[in-house]
Image (cartoon, rainbow, N blue to C red):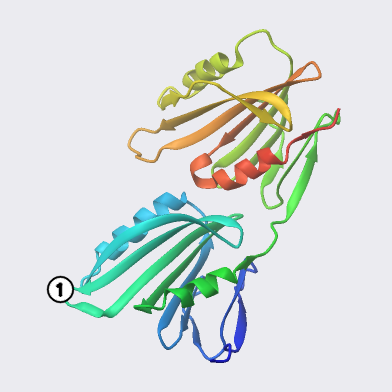
C-alpha cells in the first residue's frame, strides 16, 4: 500500500483561500492574482481576483476565451452545481484537442468557479486521463477565511443585520427621510427603510417610482411572493432591468415586512453579481422588539 504523500499548505497573499497539495509539486507565482502548481499528472491554475460579474458570466467568459485559442479546440460538458469550502460553486469539465483533431495526450480538465465575500476564485485543473480524483482531493481541502462582518442596529433598536465590513454604510435621508441604512459595494446595495405602516400598496409605489426616476431603463417585475424575513411573515418581489446599449441584466429583490406597527422595506441589488452576499445579509436580519 502506497504511503500518503507529504502535503504542503498554500495560502493566497490576500488571505482569502488556503488548501493542501502534494509537497513535491512545483509552484510558480504567475502574477499578483494567479498561481500555478505542477505535479506529475496534474496542473492547477489558481486565480483569485475581485468579483465583478455573476459566476454564470465568468463561465461564459472562460468558454469564450478558450474558444479563441489558436492551437486547440476545447469541448465543454457536464457543468454541475457543487460546493467548495462550504460555498456554492460551479464545476465545469472540458477536453482539449489539437486543431488537427488529435487528442492532446489524453488531457482532460475541470474548473471550479466559486465566489467568497468580494472575491472570485477559479481552480482550473488540467490532468492526465484518470487523475480527476487528484483534483478533487485538493478541492476537498479548500478553506476560506471568515468574512469580517459589521453589525447594524437602527436608532430605535428595532432591527439588526450584519454585512461585510468592507462595504460602505450610510444613510440616504436626502432621497428618503425614512432611510435607516444604505449599504454599497461595486454597484450592489442594500437599502433599508423603516416606515409607519402605510395603507398604500408599496410594491405598486416602488414600480411607479422606479419608472419615474429612471425612465430610460426597461423594467420587468415578478408577482409578489409570500416569504419570511427574520422569522416574520413577509412578501417579496423580484425585478430586473436593462440599460440602453448594455446587454447586462440587473436584478434585484424588494422585501416588505410589517412588524410592531411599522413597515420594513429591504431592497437588494445587484443579485446577479453579489447574490450570495445579499442573501447572507437578509439571512442575518433579526427583529429586536
Residue 32 can be seen, yes or no: no
In the displayed structure, does residue 269 sit left or right of residue 197? left
In the displayed structure, does residue 73 sit left or right of residue 288? left
In which quadrant will I find the C terminus? top right
What residue is at 73 percent from the left and 33 percent from the top?
230
Where in the figure is residue 77, as x and y percent of width and height?
A: 32, 59
Read off the residue under disc 1.
Answer: 101
Residue 277 can be seen, yes or no: yes
Where in the figure is residue 161, as x and y percent of width and height?
A: 75, 39
Q: Relative to 173, does residue 28 appear above or below in the rendering? A: below
In the displayed structure, does residue 126 sit left or right of residue 225? left
- Report the front residue among 47 and 226: 226
Where in the figure is residue 100, as x and y percent of width and height?
A: 13, 75
What residue is at 47 percent from the left and 60 percent from the top?
113
User: What SS does tag 1 mark?
Assistant: loop
Where in the figure is residue 174, as x and y percent of width and height?
A: 68, 26
In which quadrant will I find the N terminus? bottom right
List the single residue furthest toward the left.
Answer: 100
Image mark count: 1
Q: Relative to 269, does residue 34 appear above or below in the rendering? A: below
- Report the front residue among 275 and 104: 104
Q: Residues within 10 Å of mark 1 (few under 14, many from 20)?
A: few
Q: Relative to 173, does residue 124 appear above or below in the rendering? A: below
List the single residue furthest toward the front.
Answer: 1
List the single residue furthest toward the top.
Answer: 199
Quarter location, residue 15: bottom right
Amino acid at each position: 500500500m502506497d504511503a500518503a504523500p507529504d502535503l504542503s499548505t498554500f495560502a493566497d497573499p490576500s488571505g482569502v483561500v488556503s488548501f493542501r497539495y502534494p509537497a513535491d509539486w512545483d509552484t510558480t507565482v504567475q502574477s499578483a492574482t494567479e498561481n500555478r502548481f505542477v505535479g506529475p499528472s496534474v496542473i492547477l491554475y489558481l486565480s483569485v481576483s475581485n468579483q465583478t460579474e455573476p459566476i454564470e458570466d465568468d463561465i461564459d467568459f472562460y468558454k469564450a476565451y478558450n474558444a479563441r485559442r489558436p492551437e486547440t479546440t476545447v469541448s465543454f460538458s457536464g457543468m454541475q452545481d457543487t460546493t467548495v469550502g462550504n460555498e456554492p460553486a460551479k464545476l465545469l469539465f472540458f477536453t482539449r484537442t489539437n486543431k488537427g483533431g488529435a487528442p492532446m495526450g489524453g488531457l482532460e480538465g475541470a474548473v471550479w468557479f466559486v465566489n467568497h465575500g468580494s472575491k472570485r476564485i477559479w481552480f482550473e485543473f488540467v490532468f492526465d486521463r484518470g487523475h480527476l480524483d487528484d483534483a478533487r482531493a485538493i478541492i476537498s481541502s479548500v478553506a476560506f477565511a471568515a468574512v469580517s462582518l459589521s453589525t447594524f442596529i437602527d436608532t430605535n433598536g428595532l432591527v439588526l443585520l450584519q454585512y461585510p465590513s468592507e462595504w460602505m454604510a450610510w444613510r440616504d435621508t436626502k432621497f428618503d427621510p425614512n432611510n435607516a441604512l444604505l449599504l454599497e459595494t461595486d454597484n450592489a446595495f442594500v437599502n433599508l427603510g423603516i416606515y409607519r405602516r402605510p395603507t398604500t400598496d408599496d410594491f405598486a409605489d416602488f414600480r411607479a417610482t422606479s419608472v419615474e426616476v429612471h425612465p430610460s431603463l426597461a423594467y420587468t417585475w415578478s408577482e409578489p411572493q409570500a416569504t419570511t424575513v427574520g422569522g416574520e411573515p413577509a412578501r417579496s418581489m423580484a425585478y430586473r432591468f436593462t440599460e440602453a446599449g448594455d446587454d447586462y441584466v440587473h436584478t434585484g429583490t424588494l422585501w416588505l415586512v410589517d412588524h410592531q406597527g411599522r413597515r420594513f422595506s429591504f431592497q437588494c441589488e445587484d443579485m446577479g453579481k453579489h447574490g450570495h452576499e445579499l442573501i447572507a445579509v437578509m439571512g442575518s436580519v433579526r427583529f429586536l422588539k
